[in-house]
């Protein structure tokens, strides 16, 4: 059973930075689609960034391109989300997710859908004030 534990959330002012971490354990497959999602109050969960550890394209939500970077440290089984130039609209609960299959591709472009991920962390809150 894969377990995911997020950390690194907090409160920052607009323009600031945060780095989220997701410690993973219990892997049984050699590669996973790993992703970050977020959910603001009253809104649907949305994909932020994802990639397949076996190789392929990285997905970023348009609104975070150029500001957020997803990465991993394989030796530590840890996924990261570096968030720079944060905006108040980035305020949400952020979740780490994993699925033991390649990330979804539609029409040749990667997409990130919550229903495609089997394993989820408990979330870490990010609050950006103006």
Image (tube, grey):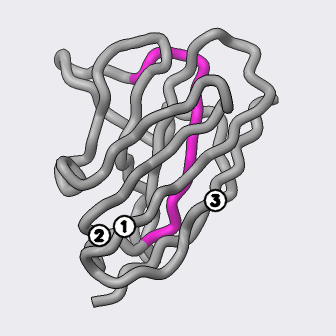
- Using residue 23 as the reference point, say whether residue 52 is left or right of it: left
Q: Residue 51 carries which label?
A: none
Few, some or many C-alpha atoms within 10 Å of disc 3 (few <14, some 14-19, many ≥20)?
some
- Residue 121 vertical placement versus 72 (above, below): below
Which region shows up in magenta?
92-103
- Using residue 6 as the reference point, say whether residue 102 is left or right of it: left
**Quick one: SS at disc 3?**
strand
Q: Distance between the residues labelled 1 and 3?
A: 14 Å
Q: Disc 1 marks which residue?
A: 17
- The residue at the point 27 percent across, 26 percent down is 110
**Quick one: SS at disc 2?**
loop
Q: Disc 3 marks which residue?
A: 7
Q: Disc 2 marks which residue?
A: 86
- The residue at the point 44 percent across, 64 percent down is 18
Residue contact between numbered discs 2 and 1, judged by CB atoms under 8 Å:
yes
Give whichever of discs 2 and 1 has the lower sequence position. 1
* Viewer-nearest residue: 19 or 42: 19
Q: Quadrant of the C terminus?
A: bottom left
- Residue 56 vertical placement versus 17 (above, below): above
- Using residue 7 as the reference point, say whether residue 40 is left or right of it: left
Give residue 71's quadrant in the image.
top left
Q: Distance between the residues labelled 2 and 1?
A: 6 Å
- Residue 46 vertical placement versus 112 (above, below): below
2 vs 1, front mark:
1
Q: How far apart are marks 2 and 3 (CA)?
A: 17 Å
Give whichever of discs 2 and 3 has the lower sequence position. 3
């Amino acid at each position: 059973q894969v377990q995911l534990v997020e950390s690194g959330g907090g409160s920052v002012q607009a323009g600031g930075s945060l780095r989220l971490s997701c410690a993973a354990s219990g892997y049984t497959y050699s590669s996973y689609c790993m992703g970050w999602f977020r959910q603001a109050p009253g809104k649907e969960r949305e994909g932020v960034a994802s990639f397949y550890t076996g190789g392929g394209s990285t997905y970023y939500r348009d609104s975070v391109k150029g500001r957020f970077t997803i990465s991993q440290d394989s030796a530590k089984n840890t996924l990261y989300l570096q968030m720079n130039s944060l905006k108040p609209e980035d305020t949400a609960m952020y979740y780490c997710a994993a699925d033991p299959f390649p990330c979804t591709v539609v029409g040749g472009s990667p997409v990130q859908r919550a229903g495609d991920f089997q394993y989820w962390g408990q979330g870490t809150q990010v609050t950006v004030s103006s």
